[in-house]
Amino acid sequence: MKSRGLGAVAAAAALALTLAACGSSSGGGGSASGGGSGLKIGIKFDQPGMGLKKGSDYTGMDVDVAKYIAKQLGTSEGDITWVQAPSAQRETLIQTGQVDMVVATYSITDARKEKVSFAGPYFIAGQDLLIRSDDSSITGPDSLDGKKLCSVKGSTSAQKVKDKYPGVQLQEFGTYSECLPALATGGVDALTTDDTILAGYASQPEFKGKFKVVGKPFSTENYGVGIKKGDTALCTKVTDAIKKMISDGSWQKAIDNNLGPAGYKPGQGNPPTPAACS
Amino acid sequence: MLDILDKYDVLGAFWMTIKLTVFSAIGALVIGTILAVMRVAPVAILRRLGAFYVNTVRNTPLTLILVFCSLGLLYILQVNLTDPKSPTSIVDNNIRWAIVGLAAYHAAFVCEALRSGVNTVPLGQAEAARSIGLTFTQSLREVILPQAFRGSIAPLGSVLIALTKNTTVASIIGVAEASGLMKEIIENETASFGVFFIFALGFVILTLPVGILFTSLSRRLAVKR
């Protein structure tokens, strides 16, 4: 009798888990992509400076860009449904229509272009290094030999380090947050990924003054807005919104607000010229 | 799908999964047996210690244990399992800490499987062993444990299968096993059914024979009563 009761509880728990997994990404009902009321936008929930969820508030550069685009599309801030878009799920979220667009440190690459379309770029980031503020031995990618770096398992930045800098040891964690304590204790010498993300961490109040961004980017990541493949009408509207955001100063303001506290200056090529939609 | 096998070292990643599984399984079996002996020992403090370990470790998420091993023990307390100056110290430390964490976690389950095996041995046998003058250790070694192991083969098989699949958690502390490579491929090629299929198939190939083997072993070796 007892074991039967336990089995029922286990079954119920398993069911609840599956339901929760499905439920988290639905929400809102089939709103047409672009224009109209209500817009579902995929962002990162865990990236300070770019897309961060704190309580019911969302902050970051991506969030500001998304809000601006939504305004240009005629959607008020209150009608935006924010959806968490982890890196591995971004294409799926767009393809299945669970989001209307993804603004989540989404680099434009050829492999991704086969599945989704991009508007933008709205920002050009580059892979950089975050080091302890008292460390003067690392001045750029050329001074990395024999050093220990930290990044996220499977990320583009981690792969680049492995391929290009064989003299470097790489610690990989599930998220960047786990790299920070290792960096603080000296277990690793630097954290490497897109400079925007690094600046976001360095700007967080708890790390202020402890870490600094080296400022010698050694790759180019074009952040774009991911939308359903072939939706040229939406792409054009989003591109116009990005152009307007850059020209009316809101773009610079968004960077100063979100990434400025760490003394971050956008790298070469910024502000970018969004590509034409095809 | 085949170009993925060409471009990435899928076999190498699964070889790491196998290594993690084998070494962790040996560690878990050793620690688990000691725990099981503690839990049936006539000394109350040993019983309580064993129960405390099992209840604590079994109810802690594996992710937490592995992150604690890597971030807590290796990076914050700086407990190295290899020379920190060596050019491969990060990789070696990660693999060894992953094995320690996996072994410590699954030892709790091995212990409970063995204890269920101990329960299959009729109480009369333990009493008979003691009455002919065998000590606790002798009766355990000669009478109880051999039968307990044979009685718990099926649940031990389940633990081994669970362990094989749980090695995927080691990717979060940077061990280059199968699921870590899958994340890499998804990052480069975007997610597709083929990628999932390759890795799911890999794990089925690893676990299915183990399941069949342990089922047939348990049928052949179980003590007929």
Image: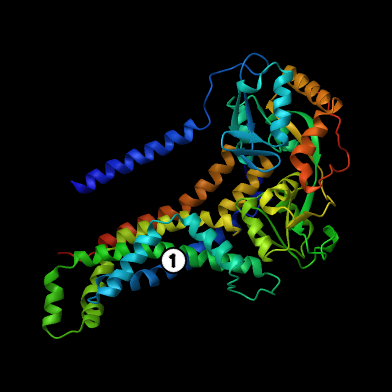
A129 shown above or below A241: below
Give whichever of A215, B3 is nearer the camera: A215
Instruction: Give the labeled residue for mark 1.
Output: B104
Could you classify mark 1 by the number of other residues whose Cα lies within 10 Å: few (under 14), some (14-19), or many (20 or more)? many
B153 with respect to A190 (left or right) = left
Give the x, y percent position of residue A137: 82, 66
Q: Amino acid at mark 1?
A: Ala
Query: For the residue labelled by badge 1, is the local secondary structure a helix, a strand or a loop?
Result: helix
Q: Residue furthest top?
A: A36
| Residue occupying the point 25% across, 62% down | B116
Asked where in the image residue A189 lies, by quadrant, the reply is bottom right
| Residue occupying the point 25% across, 68% down | B148
Asked where in the image residue B133 lies, by quadrant, the reply is bottom left
Q: Is residue A240 at all visible to an observer of this figure?
A: yes
Give the x, y percent position of residue A275: 83, 28
Q: Is residue B151 at all visible to an observer of this figure?
A: no
| Residue occupying the point 61% across, 47% down | B183
Asked where in the image residue A40 lies, by quadrant, the reply is top right
